[in-house]
Image: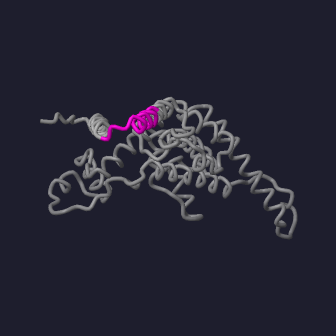
Amino acid sequence: MLSVSYVAVEEAAHRLGRTLLGIGDATLTEAIIADVISELDAVTSAELGDLSDRAAQATALDRLDVSPVQVAAADDLLRADLLGPGLLTELIDPAAACVAAARWLAAAAVVAGEAAEIDAADVFAEADDIEPVSGAVPAEVVAQIVDDETDPRSVVLDLLRTAVAAGDGIILDLSQLLAQHLGEVGLSTEEQSEVAGPTSVRVTELDPRRPARDLLEHLLDGIAACHLLYAEYDDSDEPWDDQDDAPSADLEAHRRDRTAEEFAELVRARAAQGNG
């Protein structure tokens, strides 16, 4: 009889040990042990927020927890270049990047909302009238952080838990999901109770196959949408305001750069104040 562990990782270790014992090659065993030690060290490094070398594998995982070190690193990238691609190109844990991006998105939505004189969560629908942008996910995140004063970390992890569960074929709260959907289509409580037959409901707005990366893309697109709307309502005086001719390409580029920097400065100031 062979004792088998119900812990998948433990049983994998036992199977590896039995295989090496059967082969009986000391050199191979030492090489495997050294590689396993390197892998365990990489896991430890990733847990501590260091994603260099082999620990970079962690960026491909959809973790349901975040390292404060990684959140701080993502926060620094956004502070330095709010509209840049840094979070999509640097070795940052995507879940941690989402937490930082959600905080900056909330600040950006407040700034854009004040410029357009609308609520922060309505910024994305307004920006979508200018050009297509991500709307549902950024609006939900901003509503929870700005209106409900929910911590960005909680907002992000709740969205990721729902998406990861959906990827495993699980709906975390079916009754709440159905009630929300039926309420959105305009049914009263009495009418909702009489609804029969299959109802099509989208469990998550995220891609269950890559939820953290997908959420990060939505959040960064949301920040870009905030900038788009802010630029649309920008009424700062320009050197060509008194001229009849259209501005040259150089002047237009200068205006775009100035507006982007002005927007980033306002968002930094807002982010420094907190989420409320």
**Residue at the far left in the pictured view:** 1
Q: Position of residue 42 (x, y in %)?
A: 49, 34
Q: Which colour scheme appears in the figure?
A: one colour
Q: Position of residue 88 (x, y in %)?
A: 57, 50
Q: Is residue 227 left or right of residue 42?
A: right
Q: Can you say whether 107 is above or below 186 in the image? A: above
The front one of 48 and 162 is 48
Q: Is residue 256 left or right of residue 14?
A: right
The front one of 256 and 116 is 256
Rendered residue at 36%/53% (across/down): 204
The front one of 173 and 9 is 9
Q: How many marks?
A: 0
Q: Is residue 117 left or right of residue 206?
A: right
Rendered residue at 47%/50% (across/down): 215
Whether residue 180 is visible here, answered yes or no, is yes
**Residue at the far bottom in the pictured view:** 245
Q: Is residue 104 left or right of residue 238?
A: left
Rendered residue at 26%/45% (across/down): 173
Asked if residue 24 is among those painted magenta in the image, a careful observer would answer: yes
Asked if residue 215 is among those painted magenta in the image, a careful observer would answer: no
Quadrant of the image occupied by residue 129: bottom right
Quadrant of the image occupied by residue 111: top right
Whether residue 149 is visible here, answered yes or no, is no
Quadrant of the image occupied by residue 209: bottom left
Q: Can you say whether 89 is above or below 127 in the image? A: above
Q: Position of residue 185 (x, y in %)?
A: 30, 59
Indicate the quadrant containing the N terminus: top left, top right, bottom left or bottom right: top left
Q: Which residues are magenta?
A: 23-37
Q: Position of residue 57 (x, y in %)?
A: 48, 43
Q: Main secondary structure of the magenta part?
A: helix
